[in-house]
Image: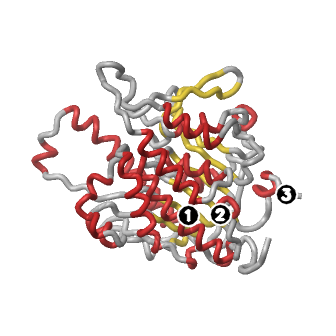
């Protein structure tokens, strides 16, 4: 008999989490890393049909990461996911609205909605095709609260949320203010909530939140911590250093700050997540946080609460050269756009090239799902 979701969630032994950042069309970068992870695991277990939900017990994401997470959770392989992205990116951002005609959002969400419904159909949050844990992170704007919406059958609010259509849940997580209009969701007992992009929170990089969802008593998972008990793999959508001249900052106008402060806060939140996870766990891919604390090589709380790996390309000229695409070094600034749908194929190619940093040793034997070379 096939293992049920609740049996998988409650089974003893190590658990594996996959966290996926927001980032608009730059989600295509993440797909490259995922293809490499899938290939490593297929080779290890000699299972050419293995998909990532077979390995990861909880897959979660924010915004574009929520699209990826949900597609993986229903069993999509990464090749199909890549095809979906190559079609979705150009469609979603093809036609910018004219402000004088309608000023509620820059883009029509219909292309997103149609694609999500085409992929997810009429599945609900409680659909039995979800054989692994799923967490979609959205922001409930009418209460200013961050919602990690999970499919765990014993979650405190699961009975309220179980009938939510998956395509609406994911659309809510992608409803970036100014880009798309909010999404209304029924949240139980006749109440509606107005949801926007989960990136409008501390969890555009959702890795730390997923660690908390998996381990805090208020959530239903209650998974054990330890470097041989919890593996967290986090996949980003690119980052870069910002440096402006003093004079340009001093001369900024009101509208400059209105557009720049949100991205400043999101970047700070992502690096704070990175610092805390490197502090909490055994980090397989340590990053230099800043010139003062370095990469926390000598810092760890106790024996460590998890094993952690982070993959995200530095989207600048040096980063693109290091990723094996030096011919694109001069296009770094253009490639950072959230909404340049024409960049999707190029971003996917960059992600595939950059993914050579993912190595089999990042998936320690303690987290094997079956002995290598075994069938089943």
Q: Residues within 10 Å of mark 2 (few under 14, many from 20)?
A: many
Residue mark closest to the camera, 3 vs 1: 3
Q: Is residue 338 left or right of residue 7?
A: left
Which of the pair 218/94 is nearer the observer? 94
Q: Quadrant of the N terminus?
A: bottom right
Q: Secondary structure at mark 3?
A: loop
Residue 68 x %, y %: 55, 51
For the point 21% across and 56% down, the residue is: 243
Residue at numbered disc 3: 2
Which of the pair 89/354 is nearer the observer? 89
Figure check: 54 above or below 227: above
Q: Secondary structure at mark 1?
A: strand
Residue at numbered disc 1: 233
Q: Secondary structure at mark 2?
A: strand
Q: Is residue 117 left or right of residue 152?
A: left
Residue 84 x %, y %: 53, 50
Coloration of the structure image: secondary structure
Q: Residues within 10 Å of mark 3 (few under 14, many from 20)?
A: few
Give the spatial CA distance, label 3 vs label 1.
Answer: 26 Å
Residue at numbered disc 2: 16
């Amino acid at each position: 008999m096939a293992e049920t979701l609740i049996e998988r969630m409650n089974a003893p032994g190590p658990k594996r989490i996959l966290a996926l950042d927001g980032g608009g069309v730059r989600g295509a970068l993440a797909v490259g890393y995922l293809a490499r992870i899938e290939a490593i695991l297929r080779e290890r277990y000699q299972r050419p049909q293995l998909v990532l939900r077979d390995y990861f017990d909880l897959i979660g994401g924010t915004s574009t990461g929520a699209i990826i997470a949900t597609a993986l959770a229903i069993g999509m392989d990464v090749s199909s996911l890549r095809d979906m992205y190559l079609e979705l990116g150009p469609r979603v951002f093809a036609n910018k609205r004219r402000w004088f005609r309608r000023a509620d959002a820059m883009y029509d969400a219909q292309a997103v909605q149609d694609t999500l419904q085409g992929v997810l159909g009429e599945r609900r949050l409680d659909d039995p095709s979800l054989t692994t844990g799923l967490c979609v992170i959205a922001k409930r704007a009418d209460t200013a609260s961050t919602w990690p919406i999970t499919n765990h059958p014993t979650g405190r609010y699961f009975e309220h949320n179980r009938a939510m259509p998956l395509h609406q849940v994911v659309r809510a997580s992608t409803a970036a203010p100014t880009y798309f209009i909010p999404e209304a969701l029924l949240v139980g007992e006749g109440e509606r909530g107005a949801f926007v992009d989960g990136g409008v929170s501390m969890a555009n990089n959702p890795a730390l939140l997923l660690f908390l969802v998996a381990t805090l008593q208020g959530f239903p998972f209650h998974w054990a911590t330890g470097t041989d008990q919890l593996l967290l793999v986090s996949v980003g959508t690119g980052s870069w250093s910002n440096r402006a001249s003093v004079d340009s900052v001093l001369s900024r106008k009101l509208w400059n700050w209105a557009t720049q402060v949100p991205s400043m806060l999101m970047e700070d939140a992502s690096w704070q997540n990175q610092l805390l996870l490197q502090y909490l766990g055994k980090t397989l891919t340590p990053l230099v946080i800043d010139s003062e604390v370095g990469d926390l090589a000598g810092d760890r709380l106790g024996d460590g609460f998890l094993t952690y790996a982070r993959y995200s390309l530095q989207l600048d000229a040096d980063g693109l050269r290091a990723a094996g695409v030096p011919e694109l070094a001069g296009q770094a600034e253009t490639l950072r756009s959230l909404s340049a749908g024409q960049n999707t194929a190029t971003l996917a190619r960059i992600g595939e090239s950059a993914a050579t940093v993912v190595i089999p040793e990042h998936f320690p034997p303690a987290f094997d799902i079956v002995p290598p070379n075994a069938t089943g």
